[in-house]
Amino acid sequence: MNSDSMMGTRVLSFSSGKGGVGKTSLVTNLGALWSKAGKKTLLIDGDWSLGKLGIAMGVRPKWTIEKVLSGEIDLLSAVQEVYPNLYLLASPSGVLGFEELDETSRNQLFFEIEALKNQFHLILFDHSSGVHSGVTPFAAAAHQQIVVTTSEPTSYTDAYAIMKILSQKYSIREFWLMVTMSHSHNESDRIIDRFMDVVRSQLEVKIRLLDIFPWEPRLGEALRRQKPFVEIYPSDQFTQKLSEVCRRLEQSPLTQNHGLRFFYGAESEPRA
C-alpha cells in the first residue's frame, strides 16, 4: 500500500504506570488484528533499553532505534515487516547507557517519525512502564491515549499518575482505559467505575473504558510461542473482545488538537 492511498496516520499511545499488566501483549495482538484487516500498522517499541515487542513476535530485528539515533541508518530502513501489513521498529535490549533518551535524541526521533507520516494507517507506541521522560513526551505526541491498568490499587494509582502528568503538562484531555487480568468482572467494573469518577473530578478530563479483560493464562502461552494470541486462537472470545477494541478506537473521531503539533503538524488529516 503506498502513501498516496493514505488519508493520514492514526497514532496510538499505550502506557501503564506499573509493569506486568500485559500491555506489550495487548499491543502485539491489536497490531496483528489491524494488519489482518488490511491496515498497514507499525508497532514502535518505546522501551528504549529493554525492547520486548520483537521477543513477543519471535523476531530478531536487524536494526534498532539505537542505530537510527547514531546516524548509521534512517528510521524507515530500521522498520522491519514481521507479518503482512505489520511492521516493527525495535528497541535495543540491554544496551548500557541507552536507558534514557536525552532531549536531543527525543527531538531527533520525533522528526524521524514525522517522516513516516502517511506511510501507515496506524502507529502503535508500546511505552515502558513508569512516568519518566522516556515515556511522557512520546505519549503526548499520539492522537489517542490508551492507559492500561488492572483493578489493583497499586496499578490504577500509577495509571492516575500518568494521566495527571499528561493532562497537566501536555494538556491531554481525553483518555481510554483498558483493564486487564480481572478475576471478577463485576468487582473490577465497580472499582474502575469509582476510579474513573475520581479521574474526571480531579483532573477534569474525559475518560472512557474500552473493556475489562479477564485473566487469560493462554496469553502467557502465546508469549512463550512468540506468536500473537489472535493468530493462535482466531475464534476465541478474547480475540473477539480485542477486535471490538480495534473497532472502537479506529471509529473514534479525532480533532486537530489530538497529538503534538510539533510531531505531526496541524496540517495532518487524521484517518477517521
Image: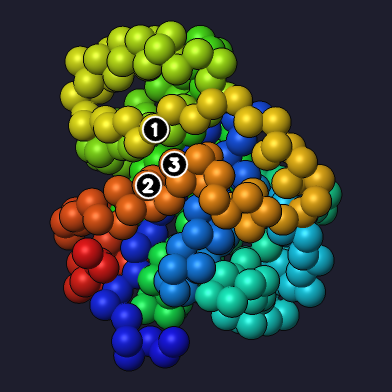
- Quadrant occupied by the N terminus: bottom left
Q: For this view, does 136 lie left or right of residue 233?
A: left
Q: For this view, does 167 lie left or right of residue 128?
A: left
Q: Secondary structure at mark 3?
A: helix
Distance from label 2 to label 1 (Cα)? 9 Å
Disc 1 crowd rating (10 Å Cα; few below 14, some 14-19, many 20+) is some
Q: For this view, does 121 lie left or right of residue 127?
A: left
Q: Secondary structure at mark 2?
A: helix
Judging by the rendered image, the residue that carries numbered circle 2 is 244
Earlier in the chain: of badge 2 and badge 1, it is 1
* Residue 183 location (% of width, % of height): 56, 16
Q: Residue at (22%, 64%) from the top-left corner?
A: 272
Q: For this view, does 256 lie left or right of residue 33?
A: left
Distance from label 3 to label 1 (Cα)? 8 Å
Marks 3,1: beta carbons within 8 A: yes
Q: In this orientation, which residue lies closer to the viewer: 3 or 234?
A: 234
* Residue 110 location (% of width, % of height): 46, 64
Query: What amino acid does circle 2 point to?
Result: Glu
Distance from label 2 to label 3 (Cα)? 5 Å
Marks 2,1: beta carbons within 8 A: yes
User: Quick check: 31 above or below 7?
Assistant: above
